[in-house]
Amino acid sequence: MPLVFLFLLSLSTLAFSRASAVITLEMPVGARQLGMGESGVALADDGNTLFYNPAGLAFGPLANEWELSREGKGQFYTAFAARNRRGFLTRNEVWAGSVNGILHFDGQVWREDLTVPLEGNAKLRDVVRTFLGSETSLDSISGVVRNYNGAKTLNEEALLVEVKIPFSIMIKDTVTAMLYEIRTEKLWIGTTKGLFRFDGKGFKDFTSEFGTRRITAIANQGATLWIGTDNGIFAYRNGVFEQRGAVLPSQKISSIAWHEMRKELYVGVEGAGIARLTPKQNDNDKDKWGVFALQDGIMDLTPKAIAIDSSGHVWTVHKEGLSHFNLRRWEQVRFENNEAHGITVSEKGAIWIGTDKGVWSYLPEYATPSGRKSETEQGRGETENTQGEWNHYHQGNGLASNTVWCLLSLGNDLWLSTGAGVERYHAAQSQVAFFYEKLLPVLNIPDLYHLYTGITWPLGDWGTWGLFVNFISFGETTVGNEINPDQEVSSFNSSETVVGLSYGTRLNKKWGLGLNFKFFYSALSSGAALNEPDATTASYAIDIGILGRDLFVKGLRFGAVLANIGPNVYYVDKSNDDPIPLTWRFGLSYDLLKLPDHRLTLNADYNKTVIYENSKGEAQPFYISAWKAWFNPEAEEDGDKAIDIFRKSFQEGILNIGAEYVYAGTVALRAGYLHDKVGKRQELDIGLGVMLSDMLQLDIASIQNVGNLEGVRDGQLRFAGLFRF
């Protein structure tokens, strides 16, 4: 099909205002961005950012990042609990306790209430009764819930399809301890005035069985729940509370941790030290208690919190530092001019300690692969544990507040209660992006298509790097006999491939820098006919990008990229070379709406190819073309004023605008518009995205031609997927 080859030579008019080679360098990717008018320079937050703006690799979710997830606004957060959910169609959930109730993070947003759909003949009063777990004050509380949902009359109540019930109706006091029990999928909440349990639909109040004790700690051992109070430690099993530890020198319990490997319970006892319990196996047996005091090597007699790491070592927090039990003896780690408050342990074995000077991270040598091997060979607790890697995070390098109270490690995230609110340290996941589109569907050429794949890898505090491949197949071309055109002489496939290596790093809290190093191979013809030279070329190009976030107002992002910096290329005749498409890209993105169930983002990009030729028709180097092309538009005429030159220069670029609406972090609707005066394109883009989980996202987009221009891309579909791991 010889027309394919001829069409290939003119295809660049779809993207470039001046003649240039290697169209694949400028072929946009990602059904998400393409559904928003091909805008993505400032959005730059997924695996497709490798094409649009590599500076996006400097920020989350592509890079490790600190984030103020929930502003304090005078609220003090006191405890965390989590539901760790893995796999497709699932998201991790976090519960945060405060001085006047609880909040729920569903994997996307924080919620202060429970949403219950009204199914069948269910009424508002019915779901409130289930929520309360009793009939006590049902009428008055139903009235409060009715007002909370904006239903002022019974008729308005009858129109409700779902009911939102604030958690504050049940939990009003300061939350002092929390635990999500995986086995029963129930949340246990300790307050200053008693113990509560939430099963996802309603609460159970244990005041009648357990009284109004101040709960200080909760831990579970299989089917047994251990509850620490300011007046004793209790075991809850099969609906029965049993007080234990009467032999302890103090009944003021500060913390509890169950050691699954050793089947022991470690208990912080105020004024006495750290108690260790080997629980009785049956009613005829007895608990075996022991107490570690100052003479055993602990730092002081007032431990604040206890954690067990993945190697079975015990860590306790004291005001001045840590006590570490390596299962053989106690060691001390003192913090100078720091007051320690809380502790948590990550899945990878890192110890995180919250202090009034920020948060410290410690990865012991024994938690590394070589250290684990050594400890296995010598026996647990037999190796010295003075080696390890320490890191310190504070307001200068990530945190919004230096005061850190309690902590929770959950998968790749670290959740912290700080003076600024709830903060999250997100350890970025790797992302793999896939993209496919059949080009120019009106031509119905099966082997004319576009493929892209990209992968990103976070490098800890150094930023993120990525690798991508952008490929276009231009189809097969047949060459006929000059005398008899119907007689085929030869055929060949035309294609272009771009392989890129990307890196992005943060300059400060608001600005990031990114680089692309691209290598390309363009084969317009190879072996087309005997004694004819191949039309192929190979070379390199570089992209430089910047990205700024939360500029002037929160949610406003700005991006700029100078793409395709590289030498001219030639296919057959070295004296007849062509420039590659040196291009400026500018973008703005703004979160116009960001609510628990609704997010609306607006994008705008401007792309301009800046190829400048001297009086001899020779393309100038990038450092000249990058600015001179702005003042020398192709359509410039003698006598044009400055305003005319600016207008014509601007019109030689491509304008992309788009919007994305996301509902409940699950479904995304997208629309965009592309205007290209030189390429004679006016296109409406529409798209749909489905976020199946934190791991998988699927997207589709379509082009619809508008105006009176003939659109060869009308009806073109784009398909993409994004996988995180």
Image (cartoon, rainbow, N blue to C red):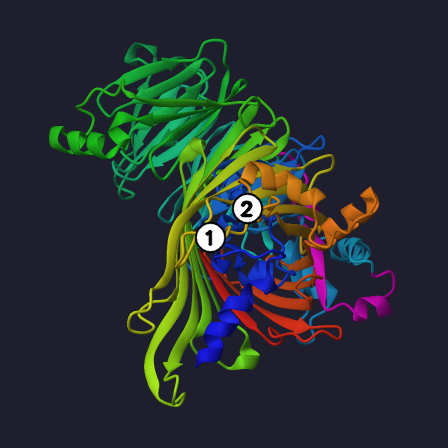
Between residue 136 and residue 257, name the one nearer to us: 257
In the picture of the structure, the residue carrying the numbered disc 1 is 577
At mark 2, the secondary structure is loop
The quarter of the displayed image where residue 225 is located: top left
Name which of mark 1 and mark 2 comes first in the sequence. 1
The quadrant where residue 332 appears: top left
Residue drawn at x 53%, y 80% as measured from the top left:
443
**Residue 201: % across, % down:** 59, 58
> In the image, what residue type sits under mark 2?
Ala
Labelled pair 1, 2 in contact (Cβ < 8 Å):
yes
At a point 55% along the width and 46% down the height, the residue shown is 619
**657 drawn magenta:** no
Quarter of the figure with residue 305: top left
Q: Nearer the viewer, residue 446 or 587?
A: 446
Q: 576 and 148: which one is in front?
A: 576
Vertical order, 716 against 633 (above or below): below
**Disc 2 target residue:** 619
Looking at the image, residue 507 sits to the left or right of residue 492; the answer is right
User: What span is in magenta?
Assistant: 151-174
Answer with left or right where residue 151 lies relative to residue 115.
right
